[in-house]
Image (cartoon, grey):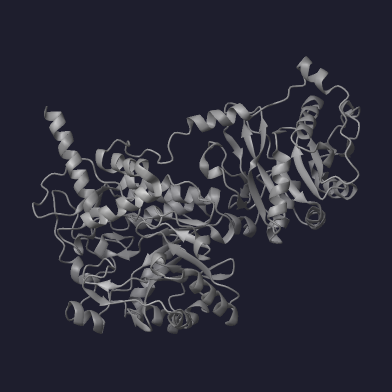
Amino acid sequence: MKDAFLARMRTVRRARNVVAAAGGPAAVSRYALRLLRTEGVAGLWSRVARHVLGTRPVGSNVRGDNTEARAALVSQLTLLNATDGSFMNDVGGTTLASGEAPTVSVMLIHRQGARLARETLIALQRASVVPESIEFGVIGCGEADAALDPLPGLRRSQVRSEADLLDGIHAFAQELRGEFVLLTTDAVQAQAGAIDALVRRLRTDVLAAAACAAILRVDATLIESGASWSPDGTFRRLGEGDDASDPSYSVSRRVPAATDLGVLIRRDVLLRAANSARTQPRATAIDALMRTLWQSNDPIVFEPEARFACQETPSAPAPAISVSAKSDRSAAPDALARAASDIRVLAFYLPQYHPIRENDEWWGKGFTEWTNVSKARPNFEGHYQPHLPADLGFYDLRVPEVRQAQADLARNAGLAGFCYYYYWFSGHRLLERPLQEVLDTGKPNFPFCICWANENWTRRWDGLESSLLIGQSYTQEDEVALFRDWLPLLRDERYIRVNGKPLVLIYRISLLPEPRRAAATWRRMAREAGLGDVYLAYVQSFDSWARGEKPADFDFDASVEFPPHGCGVPFAGDVQGLASAFRGALFDYQATAEVCLAKPNPGYPMFRGTMPSWDNTARKQNTGHIFLGASPEAYEAWLDRALSYTDRFACGDERIVFVNAWNEWGEGNHLEPDMRYKHAFLDATRRAISRWTHRPA
């Protein structure tokens, strides 16, 4: 009876947390109606079960159990075995002859025995709906294997060793006739439809130079889904050891490189790249070839529908990657590898730490963020409030030395820049002085970008219409004037760019009545200003993720995760000494991190987000949102996994992670040192970043 009573009380507490977190009963009702329209009763019930009844185990993956999907994938994988008599009878008399104008020329790099090579060739032939469109060639490394000669139609080439392979590839490619060349080895076997899927990808993505396949073990564990370089120059696989049935690997994406296990390259690109790579220092052929493609900005895409399998198991090594960790470049820093492997971690930056006339009028003379921070009081036993600054004290952002000290702390922690909130209301800017002085003085010399905080200012700190202080408008004239206001910042050499384009974030995309019009206006003005283009990203604020928004919906380029928005998990435990006046909401920090991290790769650039902690008691003493369980260790684990995701699924300049936030002291959410944790959150940031980039720990 007692246990049942306590369980009911926990359910009541969770329900209260959910209602408070959503903004009250009216907001919950609106959200429930939207769920019914978009996801039906099942979608609504899943939210109730997870957040109110607590039936989802804390930390479970919201993508669900992949057991059935993995079993289905395993059942689709087939491997030919030349030692099987039925196989030999079946392939007897097989010809590898192609038509007059083959689409694909196979270049099988033969390193192992004749049996494996024969299996690989027959599997390749069977992997295409139109086998006569494939031309087959083998380039042997080391001793020639005469056992392959009897296969009619097979083209042959030979090199003495791996050191000669690149020259051999270049020469052999000149003899081949296909529009595309498939590089593969005798360690893997193509699965049904693999070659056709790679061809379709290059036919569809006309800018791509190459497409690589998913390389799997027979138990559906990934060997690779593309490749890259470690900061020291070592060639490495992406996704090795992951579940190949994970939805994140079901979408195509750009990758830095590919190995020679299964990559289809346009023949003209291969000839050009191989010729150029022959003159450069190299570890091995595939390393040199991929470096040349990267340097010439020839994109490589991963095609999930193309699968190659091998007999490798977790207890046995994967097929050789054929690249040494050491090369002629090992004595010097590897600039290319560092660029390809780097991940930029940016922190949101609040400028409300100096008095302005409007805040004096609205909140009282001398108001800044510190006014509320110093007034916060604990709401229960062990509640960490107030959050008081350590090294920098109650600083004033009008002081240049403060801004320099912030940049020094951030740089030492491995951060690559700040993202300043930009407050602009139909030509009226607020809190602009710190960033304006950064622009005018050129100091600190630390990268930055902006996020237009395009919501109303109200007395409730929630951007809603109630108690409006200053509001937004969204005419086309506003869009033009806003971009003109941005322009001096976007032209600054410190401004953060993605693929050469200035990065601009929009906080609440849902408030723009015509986001496509705004995007078109800003892109046109960027071209007219000589910037080429602008890289537009929207923040997944409030219920953006739940609405299923995509950048393409708005003609934007990317989205930015913004925890705790859209991923808060109510706290299910008991809190001792909770104040009777408290009407806020309690959340579980670590469970929230799990929900956030469990989002699959959506198939478009989504910059992962993390937060050190969250507790806005300073702004809402009795109605705040408090995330329990936050600590430097928990934050480091979250950031580490966000970096891991970015390492696997992002490429080039789009390898970015955001931290919310650098200095949101009113929300108990800051990397800046405080009196309790000192530099612990900064140290955690530096350690996590150092594990995934060349930046020192």
Q: Residue at x 15, y 29 (%)?
A: 3
Q: Position of residue 614 (x, y in %)?
A: 28, 56
Question: Is residue 306 visible in this depiction of the protein?
Answer: yes
Picture quadrant of residue 353: bottom left
Whether residue 390 is visible, yes or no, is no
User: In which quadrant is the N terminus drawn?
Assistant: top left
> Looking at the picture, how far across and down is residue 71, in whole percent?
54, 28
The x, y position of residue 32, in whole percent, is 30, 50
The answer to whether 371 appears left or right of 645 in the picture is left
- Between 245 and 520, the residue placed more toward the observer is 520
Percent of width and height locating residue 529: 57, 82
Residue drawn at point x = 77 percent, y = 27 percent: 119
635 over 558 or under it: above or below = above
Closest to the observer: 317 or 92? Answer: 92
Dividing the image into 4 quarters, which one contains the C terminus? bottom left
Q: Is residue 443 left or right of residue 650?
A: left
How many marks do you count on the picture?
0
The outermost residue toward the left is: 580
Q: Would residue 91 appear left or right of 503 to someone viewing this image?
A: right
